[in-house]
Image (cartoon, rainbow, N blue to C red):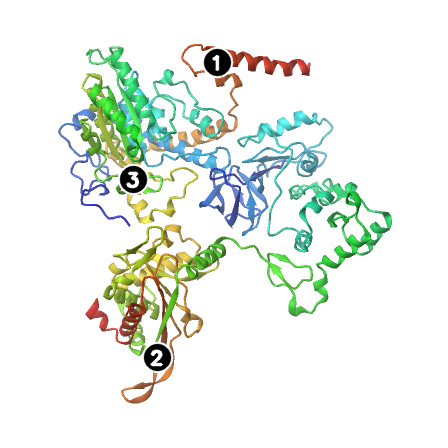
């Protein structure tokens, strides 16, 4: 018979309480083997792949990519006996449902009845039943079963949850009206379990709601679930005013009445009561980007210098290299020449390759160049760097840039790849932008922005000619880089891009 | 991006290090060494196959335990991946009467002492403080405190001296002790203290330092200005540096050191140069502090691969390897089943092994607890 088991998010560090789901490596219907990697998670400490404790067929994924899941929450259901025969009497009554857990095995609480439809005529007494399921279910610490289960915290929470909380219902009031919701009831596909399970977490709590019959009728007429209305009356009684104000605040269907132009267009997040805003928690790359930007912008006084430069010869060089047999295996772009020009300019002015160490009140001069390339990826902005870029030939540099961007877009960039950068290039030009004032990658003292390269009227040898022109911007940490140094570095970058043969002189 | 220092602290094995003892290259070629080769001459093909099996099964166990942590079945696991040769080679050089003091990553050592590897899971599942009887296997429990057991090992070795079990010339009587620790532990005072006492007392103890290059995230060259085996010399202890990914060399140098210790020649310091291929523990993420290129370079020096090449060349039939693969898979399943069923020890266990002999305070505590627990039974009946 089908045997459903659930895998709960384990604590993969020591004392971690939650993790983000980064990527599922299996889908519903897939067959998994023991120790096959099923999901990639990101904790406060590391990116970790979790192997399956079970062999079988995946019947449910209980968390979505991007969800922050608390340790102990079931994340996947596997049928470990998919080919098994259902005995007479219906699969639902006899299929087993067990859970593996990094936390406590569940008690025989009511919520469990929903997920373990194992009730039969010969149901053992509650205590014994616990022991049976606890014995199968193994995770360390199963012996002292806890009566409470950690609720699932999820961005993909039911919309009404979101509506209520974003409407500002005090959590304590919500708790008073109804005990904390247990993990959402889950159904096991293939088994008609839902018939036995309560239709929602709400119905089992209805008995606790205190409201007079007319108020109940009002709520019903307004299509409002009383379980979700905080009561302000004596002893938590829900009053007419409570219902009316809740009706005003909730009703996410309101937005349907709006025209299409302000309809929510995000998949995740929490839609506000009036349907005109969506709130999305800040996580992962976005959180780290924000942290880094704030740290950088508000500790290093930035100053940015600009130069507009005729890069016609750089464009000719790029064209020539595209046809060069040695460069047949890589993409040659103006970014490559800009990166090389920056490396050469830094070699002319090594003082800019430095970092401010606030703790020791020292300036740390780097004798090497780890060249960061800002990459827009599906997960957000990341800045991996090319180690020891000063040692690389132009071809090697091209290969490294290609590898680094491919790795970044595949989401495989490792933290070490982003550590210890000394300078960064950001190519805003690919978005058609003239230039920008980039913010330093923390720990670095210079960042070069490469603008769009367009044909412009340009004075060339005394005549106005159409020339390829771009703007370069260099932001520096003004604590240790003076305007003069910044200007000289940017000038030398421009010099190489204007006349690439200068690279031979400096290379 | 680490560059080898002028002193060769971080020099890659076998490339620039003339002092390194190696009997088997990463390509599976035997290297002749005047004093150490004779120490492995008696290891015939069957013996080498035994060493190979040791390493494969230990690695299988380690992989399974790492997965069990990811399943949520263990609180923590320190992978020994990549360090099998240093551990198996040195462990197999020990005689039954010798005594090992492992740190917490010595799966291979524990295996050679005849301890059921599954016993190590009790500790990391949070069920037990130990997992086996040290005196049954002459193998102390895993020590989690860095370096402290080097003192225990030295003390034990001085006890062996006082029992008169050193330098009698009777192989059934003479015995020695091996203390296992890592490169990070050499920065602990305990190791220096242990070396001091061992040296001046001529204690029969071998200090076996597995330099796996990383003290969690701290590379070796940030821990020492000199190669680690020079530390031993400073204490007047004969010291040797061996390729820790070479099971034959690890065996040979340990055999020599043990012979010296048992015969009354005093301690030896062995630096086995190896590499921790996995994380420090399952709580650690090595990608934050080391590069793929670094790991890749060491993967090419894998201790198991090189012995396999040698065995294939010396005539081990393919059936041996397929048979071993099957054995390893079954082993993996056994480990999982065992882990799931580890029982909690009886609560009275907490009073055992606190003192060697019965002690008044312990006796009264035990009596109190027994009476307290009995109270529940009466109430229930």
* In-image side of A165 versus B223 (left or right): right
First reached walking from the N terminus: tag 1 or tag 3:
3
Q: Residue at x 67, y 32 (%)?
A: A108
**Is B301 located above or below residue B144 in the figure?**
below
* In-image side of B266 versus A171 (left or right): left
Q: Are marks 3 and 2 in contact (CB under 8 Å)?
A: no
Between disc 1 and disc 3, the foreground one is 1
**Chain of the residue under the numbered disc 1 shown in the image:** B
Q: Position of residue B358 (x, y in %)?
A: 44, 10
Q: CA distance from mark 1 to mark 3?
A: 43 Å
Q: Quadrant location of residue B113?
A: top left
Q: CA distance from mark 3 to mark 2?
A: 52 Å
* In-image side of A68 versus B206 (left or right): right
Of residues B291 and A292, the one drawn nearer to the viewer in this rendering: A292
Give the residue number, with chain letter if any, for mark 3: B213
Give the residue number, with chain letter if any, for mark 1: B362
Residue A34 in view, yes or no:
no
**Helix or strand or loop: what does disc 1 sit on?**
helix
Between disc 1 and disc 2, the foreground one is 1
Numbered tag placed on residue A468 in the rendering: 2
**Is A32 located above or below residue B206 in the figure?**
below
Q: Residue at x 61, y 40 (%)?
A: A150
Outermost residue toward the front? A361
Q: Quadrant location of residue A324?
A: bottom left
């Amino acid at each position: 018979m089908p045997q459903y088991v659930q895998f709960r998010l384990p604590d993969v560090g020591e004392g971690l309480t939650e993790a983000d789901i980064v990527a599922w490596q299996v889908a519903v219907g897939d067959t998994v083997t023991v120790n096959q990697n099923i999901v990639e998670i990101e904790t406060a400490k590391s990116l970790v792949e979790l192997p399956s404790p079970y062999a079988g067929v995946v019947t449910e994924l209980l968390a979505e990519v991007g969800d922050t899941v608390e340790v102990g929450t079931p994340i996947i259901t596997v049928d470990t006996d998919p080919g098994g025969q259902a005995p007479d009497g219906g699969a639902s009554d006899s299929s087993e449902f067990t859970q593996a857990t990094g936390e406590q095995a569940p008690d025989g609480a009511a919520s469990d009845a929903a997920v373990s439809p194992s009730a039969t005529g010969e149901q053992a007494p509650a205590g014994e039943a616990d022991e049976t399921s606890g014995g199968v279910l193994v995770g360390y610490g199963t012996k002292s079963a806890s009566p409470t289960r950690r609720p699932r915290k999820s961005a993909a929470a039911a919309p009404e949850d979101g509506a209520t909380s974003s409407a500002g219902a005090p959590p304590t009031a919500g708790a008073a009206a109804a005990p904390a919701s247990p993990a959402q009831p889950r159904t096991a596909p293939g088994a008609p379990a839902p018939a036995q399970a309560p239709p929602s977490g709400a119905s089992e709590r209805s008995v606790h709601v205190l409201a007079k019959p007319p108020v109940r009728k009002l709520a019903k007429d307004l299509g409002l679930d009383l379980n979700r209305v905080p009561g302000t009356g004596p002893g938590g009684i829900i009053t007419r005013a409570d219902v009316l104000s809740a009706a005003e605040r909730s009703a996410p269907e309101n937005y349907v009445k709006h025209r299409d132009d302000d309809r929510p267009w995000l998949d995740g997040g929490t839609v506000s009561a009036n349907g005109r805003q969506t709130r999305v928690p800040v996580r992962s790359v976005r959180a780290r980007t924000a942290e880094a930007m704030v740290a950088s912008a508000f500790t290093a006084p930035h100053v940015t210098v600009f130069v507009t430069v005729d890069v016609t010869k750089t464009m000719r060089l790029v064209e020539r290299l595209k046809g060069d047999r040695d460069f047949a295996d890589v993409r040659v772009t103006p970014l490559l020449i800009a990166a090389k020009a920056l490396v050469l300019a830094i070699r002319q002015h090594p003082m800019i390759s430095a970092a401010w160490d606030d703790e020791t009140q020292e300036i740390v001069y780097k004798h090497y160049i780890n060249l960061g390339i800002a990459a827009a990826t599906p997960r957000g902005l990341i800045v991996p760097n090319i180690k020891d870029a000063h040692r690389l030939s132009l071809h090697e540099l091209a290969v490294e840039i290609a590898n680094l961007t491919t790795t970044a877009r595949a989401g495989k960039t490792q933290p070490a790849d982003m550590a210890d950068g000394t300078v960064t290039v950001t190519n805003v030009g690919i978005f058609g932008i003239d230039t920008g004032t980039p913010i330093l990658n923390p720990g670095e003292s210079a960042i070069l922005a490469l603008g769009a390269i367009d044909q412009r009227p340009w004075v060339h040898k005394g005549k106005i000619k159409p020339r390829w022109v771009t703007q370069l911007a260099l932001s520096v940490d003004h604590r240790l880089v003076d305007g003069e140094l910044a200007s000289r570095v940017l000038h030398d970058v421009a010099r190489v891009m204007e006349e690439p043969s200068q690279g031979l002189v400096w290379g | 991006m680490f560059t080898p220092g002028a002193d060769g602290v971080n020099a890659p094995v076998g490339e620039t290090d003339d002092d390194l003892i190696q009997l088997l290259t990463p390509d599976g070629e035997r290297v002749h060494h005047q004093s150490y080769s004779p120490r492995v001459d008696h290891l015939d093909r069957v013996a080498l196959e035994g060493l190979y099996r040791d390493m494969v099964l230990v690695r299988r166990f380690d992989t399974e335990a790492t997965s069990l942590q990811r399943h949520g079945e263990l609180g923590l696991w320190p992978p020994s991946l990549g360090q099998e040769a240093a551990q198996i080679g040195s462990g197999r050089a020990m005689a039954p009467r010798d005594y090992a003091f492992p740190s917490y990553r010595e799966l291979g050592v524990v295996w050679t002492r005849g301890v059921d590897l599954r016993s190590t899971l009790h500790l990391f599942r949070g069920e037990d403080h130990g997992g086996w009887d040290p005196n049954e296997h002459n193998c102390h429990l895993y020590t989690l405190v860095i370096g402290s057991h080097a003192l225990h090992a030295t003390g034990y070795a001085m006890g062996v001296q006082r029992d008169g079990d050193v330098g009698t010339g009777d192989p059934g009587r003479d015995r020695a002790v091996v203390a296992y620790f890592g490169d990070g532990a050499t920065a602990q005072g305990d190791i220096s203290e242990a070396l001091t006492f061992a040296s001046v007392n001529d204690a029969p103890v071998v200090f076996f330092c597995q330099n796996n290059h990383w003290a969690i995230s701290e590379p070796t060259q940030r821990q020492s200005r000199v190669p680690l085996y020079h530390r031993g010399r400073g204490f007047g202890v004969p010291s040797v540096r061996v390729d820790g990914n070479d099971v034959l060399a690890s065996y040979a140098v340990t055999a020599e050191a043990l012979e010296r210790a048992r015969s009354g020649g005093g301690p030896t310091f062995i630096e086995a140069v190896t590499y921790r291929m996995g994380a420090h523990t399952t709580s650690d993420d090595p990608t934050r502090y080391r590069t793929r290129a670094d790991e890749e370079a060491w993967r090419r020096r894998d201790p198991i691969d090189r012995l396999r090449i040698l065995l294939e060349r010396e005539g081990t039939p393919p059936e041996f390897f397929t048979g071993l693969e099957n054995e390893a898979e079954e082993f993996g399943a056994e480990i999982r089943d065992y882990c799931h069923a580890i029982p909690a020890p009886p609560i009275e266990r907490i009073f055992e092994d606190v003192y060697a002999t019965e002690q008044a305070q312990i006796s009264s505590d035990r009596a109190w607890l027994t009476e307290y627990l009995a109270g529940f039974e009466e109430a229930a009946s």
